[in-house]
Image: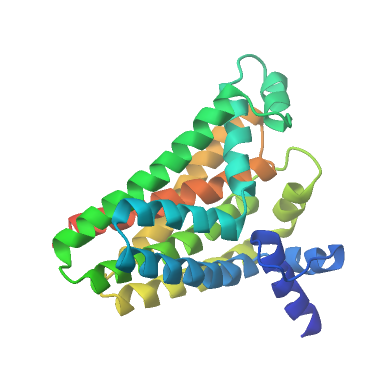
Amino acid sequence: MNSFLLALRSGFGFLSTIPVGITMEGLDEFFKRTYLHLVVGIVIGLLMGAVAYMLVYLLPMPIAAILIIAFVYYLTGLNHLDGIGDLGDGLTAHGSVEKKLKALKDMSLGIGGVVYASITVIAFYAVLISLHGEATMVYRNVADVAGIFFFAMLVSEISAMQSMLTIAAFGKPLHEGLGSILVNQTTIPKYLAGFTIGIIACIVSSFYFGLLIAGVLAFLVAILSSFVLLNISKRHFGGVNGDVIGASNEVGRLVSLIVIIIVIMYGGII
């Protein structure tokens, strides 16, 4: 039990900026239980959802959207967004696989990385604004609209965590590092354990907020987006590293939010 609690605490230290303390021993225990990504994702998602609810309820949406984004990156750190930037540098580098790998691993940020990271943040803002617009067309009560944001932020964070596990479970490591440890430790049984935790949480939240299968669809499509990213990474680099895993978190979050918007738009059909 002590090792499990150490692993769980280290998971919060590794995946968020919550000051719980982190040690190599704790990381080792956490990587032995990679399915705990989903437990951490549920807790972080609840925090994001609570903050989003208050901001949407109290403030004009453009301001609320900016503050939601700021809180998400304050709570989770910028490591995953940095992964998007490094991935952008690698994908936009011309030439051989070796040249692309060099750009991927380069500590300095190039124009490709700047563009990819910028598009990610802009897309995040646009998705939040779109979610508000669609929600207000269906729900007249501001508390109900804010509740949709609670739901969306919770599901999107759960989906983002499972997206990372998808890359880790089915990817081939490019080099030694934390990314390769995660890949090597994420066996199919651990992946399925995380999947089970995540999809149950999405089912429960969907029914609680009266959105039928919205959470499940968002979760599954985010996983599909990770397989697309995995294929792109294999073609360009021959495998995956921590940057690709981190990038899948950002992509998974955005994709799941987009799916929720579509479900709300066509709620009478889906």
Q: Is residue 259 above or below residue 242?
A: below
Give the quadrant of the C terminus. bottom left
Q: Determine the residue positioned at 40% across, 49% down.
A: 255
Is residue 145 at all visible to an observer of this figure? Answer: yes
Q: Determine the residue positioned at 27% across, 50% down.
A: 130
Give the quadrant of the N terminus. bottom right
The front one of 2 and 119 is 119
Side (left or right) of 223 relative to 245: left
Q: Quadrant of residue 57?
A: bottom left
Q: Where is residue 45 shown, x and y percent of the image?
A: 49, 67
The front one of 199 and 189 is 199
Q: Determine the residue positioned at 64% across, 52% down.
A: 168
Q: Where is residue 149 shown, x and y percent of the image?
A: 34, 64
Q: Determine the residue positioned at 32% across, 79% down.
A: 208
The front one of 127 and 1 is 127
The front one of 72 and 191 is 72
